[in-house]
């Protein structure tokens, strides 16, 4: 695990989709005359056992009404800490009680990611994602097919609150990840969890397409139900005026301003949802009434002093620290996010107030946005 590496394609489609027998729609998306110049192949690798784990996670996250109350710890936390201490090398010598645990930060996970891998895991399930390094040095994040696929139930738990249901079937595109970058991985894929429906990752940079006009024609042909991306990608997409009817746009990576939100809402006529997430643990919360509502009952949130390893009293502002998650290859205990906020608990649901994430910076080149975060 060193510097930036190009991905190596080594699996067949049958290995990527062990539970999907009919791959004809995948071939259609790839071979369409309007398709972009896809440069990667991706699959969820969910067999029947792993799919059941994703379904169980979906049931929990979509039905949870209360996470924990003020001045209380969630009931799952003690067992989680004990398991980490027993099976995860980095935590073997750590205290049993959460209150005795020091915080950790990105530099520790980046330097020794293998120390966070449980001794109980099958390394055949190991997947590695390398961050771009735009918020610091590049970092290898370890995960498995189940935790990777669980971003979909996390998304659904947000859509549920908007009354949005996904039409999951094998002949349509449920989600398109839209990028506007100089270069990025692009692919057509299928979601086993979403009943073999299509998932796209596209870059609207004209150089990624055989003909620039195909960018809009391809999107209009497949008309994804959900678009995900960052505010700059969405504004670049808006400039192309695609005739599509998404059920929602889900923004991440940087703050969505009210001005951009209104422009997107006016054109696409659907909810524009601003999410807060980390590569290390995926989605955490989404913006609701000038604050962020937490969506993960298995993620415990605390606020610490920026410079000292001191837990701050309820309601005080400091650095957001997280414990838990569902990634067995990166179990987190008091992990400093580098983001700042206050916490409020209402009816057992945590809310992140006045979130100050790492600063987004946009570079402009001939009307092309290249967003990043410091």
Image (cartoon, rainbow, N blue to C red):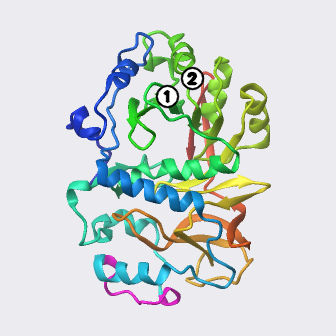
Q: In which quarter of the image is residue 193?
A: top left
Disc number at residue 330?
none
Q: Residue at x 64, y 29 (%)?
A: 246
Front residue of this view, candidates 10 and 230:
10
Q: In the rendered view, tell whether residue 229 sits above or below residue 347.
A: above
Q: In which quarter of the image is residue 304?
A: bottom right
CB of mark 1 within 8 Å of CB of mark 2? yes
User: Badge 1 local density, few (<14 within 10 Å), some, or many (20+)?
Assistant: many
Q: Residue at x 50, y 35 (%)?
A: 168
| Residue 98 shown in magenta | yes
The reply, left or right, for residue 96 in relation to residue 179 is left
* Image spot of residue 167 (x, y percent): 55, 34
Of pointers 1 and 2, the one earlier in the residue sequence: 1
Residue segment shown in magenta: 90-100
| Residue 369 shown in magenta | no
Which quadrant, please, contains the N terminus?
A: bottom left
List the residue tagged with mark 2. 223
The reply, left or right, for residue 132 in relation to residue 248 is left
* Residue 85 in view: yes
Front residue of this view, candidates 80 and 51:
51
* Residue 139 in view: no
Q: Residue at x 59, y 53 (%)?
A: 157
User: Badge 2 local density, few (<14 within 10 Å), some, or many (20+)?
Assistant: many
List the residue tagged with mark 1. 173
Front residue of this view, candidates 2 and 77:
77
Q: Distance between the residues labelled 1 and 2?
A: 7 Å
* Image spot of residue 134 (x, y percent): 49, 48
* Image spot of residue 233 (x, y percent): 59, 32
């Amino acid at each position: 695990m060193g510097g930036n590496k190009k991905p190596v394609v080594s699996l067949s489609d049958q290995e990527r989709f062990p539970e999907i027998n009919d791959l004809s729609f995948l071939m259609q998306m790839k071979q369409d005359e309007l398709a972009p110049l896809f440069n990667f192949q991706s699959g969820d690798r969910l067999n029947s056992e792993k799919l059941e784990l994703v379904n169980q996670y979906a049931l929990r996250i979509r039905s949870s009404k209360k996470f924990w109350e003020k001045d209380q710890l969630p009931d799952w936390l003690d067992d989680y800490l004990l398991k980490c201490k027993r099976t995860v090398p980095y935590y073997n010598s750590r205290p049993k009680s959460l209150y005795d645990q020091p915080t950790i930060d990105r530099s520790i996970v980046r330097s020794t990611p293998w120390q966070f891998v449980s001794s109980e895991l099958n390394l055949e399930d190991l997947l590695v994602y390398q961050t771009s390094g735009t918020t610091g040095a590049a970092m290898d994040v370890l995960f498995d097919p189940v935790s990777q696929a669980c971003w979909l139930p996390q998304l659904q738990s947000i859509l549920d609150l908007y009354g949005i249901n996904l039409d999951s079937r094998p002949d349509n595109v449920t989600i398109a990840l839209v990028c506007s970058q100089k270069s990025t991985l692009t692919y057509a894929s299928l979601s086993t969890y979403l009943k073999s429906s299509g998932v796209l990752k596209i870059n609207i940079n004209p150089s990624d397409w055989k003909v620039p006009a195909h960018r809009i024609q391809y999107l209009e042909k497949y008309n994804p139900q959900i678009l995900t991306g960052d505010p700059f990608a969405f504004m670049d997409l808006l400039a192309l005026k695609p005739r599509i009817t998404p059920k929602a746009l889900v923004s991440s990576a940087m703050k969505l301003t009210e001005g951009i939100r209104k422009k997107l809402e006016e054109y696409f006529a659907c909810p524009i949802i601003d999410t807060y997430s980390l590569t290390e643990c995926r989605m955490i919360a989404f913006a609701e009434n000038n604050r962020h509502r937490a969506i993960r009952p298995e993620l415990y949130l605390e606020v610490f002093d920026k410079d000292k390893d001191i837990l701050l009293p309820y309601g005080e502002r400091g650095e957001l620290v997280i414990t838990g998650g569902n990634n067995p290859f990166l179990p987190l205990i008091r992990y400093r996010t580098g983001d700042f906020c206050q916490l409020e608990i209402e009816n057992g649901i945590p809310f992140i107030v006045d979130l100050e994430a790492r600063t987004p910076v946009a570079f402009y080149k001939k009307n092309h946005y290249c967003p990043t975060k410091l």
